Image (tube, rainbow, N blue to C red):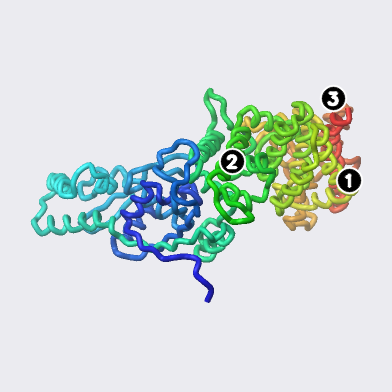
């Protein structure tokens, strides 16, 4: 048998809590935010009270020698020796209740967890208004460990409150006191921890976690880097989380990162900072670099860690700069995208922001040229799903292409070369029509089509309103202003014996119409409803109708075609419209 990677250590609950207070153990880090329900925390205390085993913790030594310095100013007495890898939810729940501190939820809201205890039958409950009024309960067990009063005084106060509602016999008093003593003594509850040595690298730590905790959130490199930020640069971690929290909240007056495209998570913005600061998308080695580890010798250095964190600090400051962020959001609008509903890949948006910042800071590309090249890049990457598979590998290749670039023109040229090598004649005539052969409601090609309609200033089918106007995310009503209409209605196709949902719901069978028109068309055949609209619009403005039919990829006589022939022709026509939309972006580059 090979040498074990860990040592086994037993902790009492009060020892773990004290070590967290002192900064010996880092909490919370890897699996933030707190996702346990209050009832799960209640059940944890119940199991401990009954003497049941509740699992063990997995810690990892950080490998930094004693006396190391922390970056920035924080409340911790020292940099933690141990990072918690598994058991963070349990430990956060315990720490939050015993110390009476708030936890951060997935929506970035903060909450105090109040657990109640009924000594009579030794029952734990999540505290609510009724329980707080019930004298049989200790409404918040946090108070018993808070040090506000002694244990004896706490018991006397509870019994005095109870006697006001019912008689308490001597035997009852002894039993109730024993129950409360048992609650107080949970501090001595024993936990077993496996401590991984600092020589174990992060890939092996992640493997250990997955093998012992199949239900846990899989760890990735971003998790480990966010952990290091908590340990060595806590202010930076808090700044990142605060920024992301603000991006989730509709602002009142102050400037804010809030937007209609993405509600970013800390790990997403971290990837932007890493891409900008270190020109890396693979985070595998960045973790070791930030620990101050020499990749050749394996030795750690305080000075090396400080210099690398300085790079990250500068990059994060630039990434979270609100002017930079909102200038990038304008790029998405320039590319024809109007809201998060049109974004099929958030990682594609994140990586495009990284390239935007690299072009802005490192290459000094002028404002106008940068917006245009990143708009073209985003349109290309979103339409092709460039970062939907092996995203880190693809982005690393894209970053590597910039290695030899020196000037603003070089930056633009490198990205344009990738775009043009992707948008070949075969892509527009063969690949893209093939991608449109799907019934998926959230596909890159569909949103690329909508973006193209926005770029072409297209009107909604059978309407004088623009597509962009009705795709505006600020429009909120009970009925969507814009609906996807089956050009060949489902019931009509059903009457022809076509009931396969994948065929009926082909993207090429949909067009954007206003909802009243969708209701009016109902289940009529194209040959029945379409001439009515043609006569209506041709009588007002024949040229407008011709443009509308072109934008919506409806060739002459489409309403009389067999369904399969219609789909094949329209897929090619939609691809052509998308190409024309992109040409609107490219024409600025060629001007």
Instruction: Give the Cα separation between the discs numbered 1 and 3.
Output: 39 Å
Q: Quadrant of the C terminus?
A: top right
What mark, if any, has residue 307 been given in the picture? 2
Q: Nearer the viewer, residue 279 or 442?
A: 279
In the rendered image, residue 182, in percent from the top left (x then y), is placed at 23, 58
Residue sticking out furthest to the bottom: 1
Taking the spot 74% from the left edge, 44% from the top edge, the residue there is 399
Residue 324: image quadrant is top right
Residue corresponding to mark 3: 540
| In-image side of 469 versus 549 (left or right) | left
Q: Give the secondary structure at mark 1.
A: loop
Residue 486 in the image, given as x and y percentages of width and height: 75, 45
Mark 3 falls on what kind of element? helix
Which residue corresponds to the image point at 76% horizontal and 37% vertical from the top-left? Answer: 451
**Cα gap from disc 3 to disc 2, whole angstroms:** 69 Å
Task: Tell me if residue 486 can be seen.
Answer: no
Mark 1 highlights which residue? 424
Give the label, 1 or 2, closer to the camera: 2
Tag count: 3
State left or right for residue 298 relative to residue 466: left
Name the quadrant containing residue 264. top right
Quadrant of residue 206 in the image? bottom right
Q: Would you place residue 479 above or below residue 560 in this image?
A: above
Query: Pointer 1: residues within 10 angstroms few (<14), some, or many (20+)?
Result: few
Element class at badge 2: helix
């Amino acid at each position: 048998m090979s040498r074990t990677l860990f040592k086994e250590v037993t902790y009492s609950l009060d020892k773990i809590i004290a070590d967290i207070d002192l900064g010996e153990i880092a909490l919370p880090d890897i699996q933030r935010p707190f996702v346990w329900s209050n009832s799960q925390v209640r059940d944890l205390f119940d199991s401990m009270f009954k003497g049941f085993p509740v699992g063990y913790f997995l810690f990892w030594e950080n490998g930094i020698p004693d006396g190391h310095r922390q970056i920035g100013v924080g409340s911790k007495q020292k940099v933690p020796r141990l990072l918690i890898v598994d058991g963070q939810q349990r430990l956060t729940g315990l720490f939050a209740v015993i110390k009476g501190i708030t936890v951060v939820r997935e929506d970035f809201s903060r909450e105090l967890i109040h657990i109640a205890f009924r000594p009579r039958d030794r029952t734990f409950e999540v505290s609510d208004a009724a329980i707080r009024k019930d004298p049989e309960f200790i409404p918040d067990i946090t108070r018993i460990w808070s040090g506000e009063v002694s244990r004896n005084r706490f018991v006397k106060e509870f019994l005095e409150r109870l006697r006001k509602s019912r008689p308490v016999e001597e035997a009852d008093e002894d039993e109730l006191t024993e129950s409360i003593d048992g609650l107080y003594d949970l501090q001595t509850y024993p936990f077993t921890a496996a401590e991984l040595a600092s020589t174990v690298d992060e890939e092996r730590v992640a493997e250990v976690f997955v093998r012992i905790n199949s239900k846990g959130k899989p760890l990735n490199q971003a998790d480990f880097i966010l952990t290091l930020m908590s340990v060595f640069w806590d202010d930076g971690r808090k700044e990142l989380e605060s920024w992301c929290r603000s991006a989730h909240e509709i602002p009142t007056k102050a400037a804010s990162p809030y937007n209609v495209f993405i509600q970013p998570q800390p790990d997403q913005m971290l990837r932007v900072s890493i891409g900008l600061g270190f020109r890396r998308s693979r985070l595998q080695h960045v973790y070791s670099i930030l620990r101050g580890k020499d990749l050749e010798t394996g030795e750690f250095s305080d000075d090396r860690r400080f210099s690398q964190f300085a790079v990250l600090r500068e990059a994060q400051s630039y990434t979270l700069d609100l002017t930079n962020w909102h200038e990038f959001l304008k790029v998405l609008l320039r590319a024809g995208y109007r809201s998060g509903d049109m974004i099929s890949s958030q990682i594609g948006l994140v990586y495009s922001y990284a390239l935007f910042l690299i072009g802005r800071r490192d290459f000094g590309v002028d404002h106008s040229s940068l917006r245009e090249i990143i708009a073209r890049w985003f349109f290309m990457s979103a339409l092709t799903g460039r970062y939907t598979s092996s995203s880190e590998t693809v982005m690393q290749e894209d970053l590597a292409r910039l290695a030899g670039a020196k000037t603003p023109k070089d930056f633009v040229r490198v990205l344009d070369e990738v775009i043009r090598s992707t948008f070949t004649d075969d892509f527009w005539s063969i690949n893209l029509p093939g991608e449109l052969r799907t019934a998926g409601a959230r596909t890159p090609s569909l949103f690329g089509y909508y973006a193209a309609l926005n770029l072409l200033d297209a009107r909604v089918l059978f309407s004088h309103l623009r597509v962009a106007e009705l795709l505006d995310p600020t429009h909120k009503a009970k009925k969507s202003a814009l609906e996807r209409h089956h050009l060949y209605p489902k019931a009509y196709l059903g009457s022809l014996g076509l009931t396969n949902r994948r065929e009926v719901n082909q993207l090429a069978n949909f067009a954007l119409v206003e909802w009243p028109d969708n209701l009016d068309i109902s289940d009529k055949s194209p040959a029945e409803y379409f001439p009515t609209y043609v006569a209506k619009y041709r009588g007002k403005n024949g040229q407008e109708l011709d443009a509308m039919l072109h934008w919506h990829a409806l060739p002459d006589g489409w309403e009389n075609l067999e369904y399969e022939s219609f789909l094949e022709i329209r897929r090619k026509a939609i691809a052509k419209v998308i190409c024309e939309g992109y040409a609107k972006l490219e024409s600025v580059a060629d001007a």
